[in-house]
């Protein structure tokens, strides 16, 4: 699972930046290429997430 990290936070499901790392609230990608495409467009970077992360 991958999330997009921007400005000391992550992109949430509603498209806003959040500092929470809860998997229920983050925009999650299963494919790294899809997440990299969006990250390149918005100036973020891709971060791999583990399921156990809270």
Image (cartoon, rainbow, N blue to C red):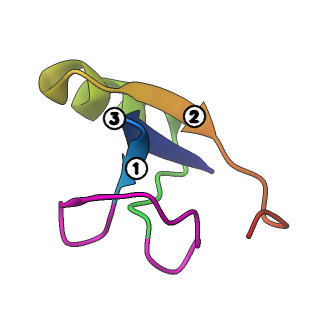
Secondary structure, mark 1, is strand
- Most common secondary structure along the magenta stretch: loop
Element under disc 2:
strand
**Disc on res. 47:** 2
Name the residue: 47% across, 58% down: 28
Q: Is residue 30 above or below residue 5?
A: below
In percent of width and height, residue 45 lies at 41, 24
Q: Residue at x 78, y 64 (%)?
A: 51
Near mark 1 (Cα within 10 A), the count class, few <14, some 14-19 or many ≥20, is many
In space, the residues marked 1 and 2 are separated at their CA atoms by 9 Å
Q: Earlier in the sequence, mark 1 or mark 2?
A: 1
Q: Which residue is mark 3?
A: 6
Callout 3 touching callout 1 (CB < 8 Å): yes
How far apart are the alpha carbons under marks 3 and 2?
10 Å
Q: Secondary structure at mark 3?
A: strand
- What percent of the width, then of the height, locates residue 53? 78, 63
Residue 39 colored magenta?
Answer: no
Q: Position of residue 10 (x, y in %)?
A: 40, 49
Q: In terms of image quadrants, where is residue 14?
A: bottom left
Q: Residues within 10 Å of mark 2 (few under 14, many from 20)?
A: some
Span of residues in magenta: 12-25
Residue 10's tag is 1
């Amino acid at each position: 699972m991958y999330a997009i990290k921007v400005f000391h936070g992550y992109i949430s499901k509603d498209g806003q930046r959040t500092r929470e790392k809860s998997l229920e609230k983050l925009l999650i990608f299963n494919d790294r290429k899809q997440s990299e495409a969006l990250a390149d467009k918005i100036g973020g970077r891709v971060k791999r997430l583990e399921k156990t992360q809270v």
